[in-house]
Image (cartoon, rainbow, N blue to C red):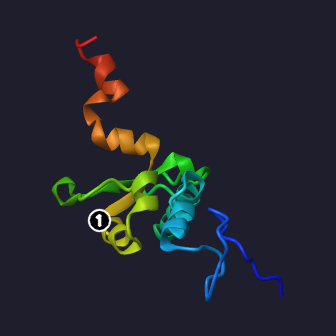
Amino acid sequence: MNRLTNCKICKKELSGKQRLYCSVKCKNRKHQSYPAQKLRGLKRKLKLVLMAGGECSKCGYAKNLSGLSFHHLDAPEKDFKLDMRSLSNRTIEKVMNEFEKCILLCHNCHSEVHNPALDLEVLSSSRLL
């Protein structure tokens, strides 16, 4: 077995039970890097989307992960958005607690839910435009 002898981050020689990183600081630098955060966020979003049924709960859209978002059913209960930043940087426990307050919507349906007064049929028949 080839044992790594230097830290993957700073290249300092490893000692004792250290296998990849010489310190917690170097380990955190690896796990807090942008590529690591992005991958963690994508994995978590995919897991939550599948747990929510894998499609928009209003229209059934299910083509692209980036086309789906989480809508909070009760806005005052919302602690944070379930966006990529929150999904990658918050504890899984906090993410799951927030997920329980949401439904899965595609971006089009999400926009319609938040902006019902901008319905094109209503606007075109009114004197607003």
What amino acid is found at the position of numbered circle 1 in the picture? Lys
- The residue carrying pointer 1 sits among few (fewer than 14), some (14 to 19) or many (20 or more) residues within 10 Å by Cα, namely some
Q: Going 67% across and 67% down the picture, which residue do you hit? A: 8
Q: Up-down: is 26 above or below 20?
A: above
Residue 73, position in %: x, y? 26, 58
Please tell me which residue is depicted at 63% across the width and 63% down the height of the picture: 9
Where's residue 63, x and y in %?
62, 51
Residue 14 is left or right of residue 34, and the answer is right
Q: Nearer the viewer, residue 75 or 120?
A: 75
Q: Is residue 5 left or right of residue 78?
A: right
Q: In this view, does 39 lie to the left or right of 115?
A: right
Quadrant of the snapshot with the N terminus: bottom right
- Foreground residue among 57 and 103: 103
At 57% from the left and 63% from the top, the residue drawn is 30
Residue 121 is situated, as x and y percent measured from the top left of the image, at 35, 25
Quadrant of residue 108 in the image?
A: top left
Residue 13, x across and y down, in percent: 67, 73
Q: In which quarter of the image is residue 6?
A: bottom right
Judging by the rendered image, the residue that carries numbered circle 1 is: 101
Residue reaching furthest left?
76
| Rendered-image quadrant of the C terminus | top left
Visible residue check, residue 114: yes
